[in-house]
Structure formats: C-alpha cells, structure tokens
Amino acid sequence: MKKRVGVFVCDCGTNIASVVDTEKVAEYASTLPGVVYSTTYKYMCSDPGQELVRKSIQEHQLEQLVIASCSPRMHEKTFRRAAEAGGLNGYMFEMVNIREQNSWVHPDREEATRKAQDLVRMGVSKVLRNKPLQVATVPISKKAMVIGGGIAGMQAALDIAEAGHQVILVEREATIGGKMTQLDKTFPTMDCAA
Ligand code: SF4
C-alpha cells in the first residue's frame, strides 16, 4: 500500500485558529510517518479550499487525506466529494474534529494545540489502514414481519398494512389477541375483551 498522506488543517476563520495554533499542527503533521504534504487554509470547505484539496492530491500524488476541521456532520460529504474530484476513492479520507471537540471547548492554546496534534496523529494512523470502498445498492422487498400477535403486534401489523405493505404476523399461540383474550371485561366501558 502506498503511503502518501496529505493533511489539511482548517482555521475556520478564527473559530479554530484563535485557540489552536494551526500552523504548528500542520508542521507537526509533516513529521508523521506517511505524511508527504501538510498545509493550513482559512476556510477549507469554501470552493477555493476544496480546490486546494483537489489540486494537492494531483500535485503531490496523495493517496490518503486527513482533514482537521469541524465535525464530520458538517462537511464529511463535502470533503469526500473533493477527494473524489481529485481522483481518490472517497473513503481514503478521515475527518478530524478540532473545532467542536477542541477549539470550542478548550480555552488553553497550548493544550488545545497539543490535542489537535494528537487528533491529527490518530487520523493519519487510521487513514493509512483505510481501504477503498464502493457504495452498494441492495434490492429490498417491502414486506414486514411482526413477531407477537398481542394488541401491540396486531395494531402494528394493521398500521403497516394500511401503509400499503404486505405484513406477516407471527404468533406462537393458537390464537392472536395475547393477554387481552384472557380477560372477561375491560374497565371503564366494561366491553367484552374478546
Ligand atoms: S471546513 Fe468546517 S471548520 Fe473549516 S471553515 Fe468550513 S465549517 Fe469551518
């Protein structure tokens, strides 16, 4: 496996850079085994930021990427697309969160920078073990099986059937109805339970 990792450390304006010394993190990243390129950028998710990622993949023949920025909930898909635009499999990429889990919660610059370095080191270590993945499409049959024919099971089966799907209701006893069938009358209407 080739080991040509690129590390991109995002400032997020001052969101990250006011607490974490991003230059120092990028400098540290360049000393890690497998890392052949590391840099910082003000707004990595912006169009120029994504272009930087794409161009760097080609210029430095990067095989794996680590992007240290915000939560993957924000931009994992953005960077996966940027990796693919640069010719990589989108899963040869790891996102490291140095904003929500670091600069937003730590006031001490030195410690936050050290934590960011640790997170980047872990990200690099992980991405070197990543394997290219393909998104699979799996055919499904829109059928449901409900286990238990008590009141809850019967109602669930009816709801699913009313939504237009075939339902198989499984009950181990000879009759459906569960505990309800053992009752004579139910309070407060005193209706026949059966
Ligand atoms: S990638 Fe995330 S951390 Fe970087 S600028 Fe965009 S929102 Fe901020």
Image: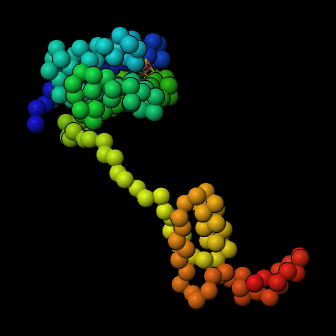
Q: Residue at x 38, y 13 (%)?
A: 47
Q: Residue furthest left?
A: 1
Front residue of 5 and 178:
178
Q: Position of residue 18 (x, y in %)?
A: 45, 14
Q: Residue at x 22, y 28 (%)?
A: 88
Q: How many marks?
A: 0
Q: Residue at x 53, y 77 (%)?
A: 170
Q: Position of residue 184 (x, y in %)?
A: 80, 88
Task: Report which quarter residue 95 is drawn in.
Answer: top left
Quarter in which the N terminus is drawn: top left
Q: Is residue 66 left or right of residue 18?
A: left
Q: Is residue 138 visible?
A: yes
Q: Is residue 84 left or right of residue 193?
A: left
Q: Position of residue 155 (x, y in %)?
A: 66, 68
Q: Is residue 111 visible?
A: no
Residue 133, above or below 57: below
Front residue of 125 and 146:
146
Figure coloring: rainbow
Quarter in which the C terminus is drawn: bottom right
Front residue of 77 and 169:
169
Residue 49, above or below 83: above
Q: Residue at x 22, y 16 (%)?
A: 56
Residue 95, above or below 172: above
Task: Report which quarter residue 19 is drawn in.
Answer: top left
Q: Is residue 3 left or right of residue 147?
A: left
- Indicate the quadrant of ligand 1 in the picture: top left
Q: Position of residue 97 (x, y in %)?
A: 40, 30
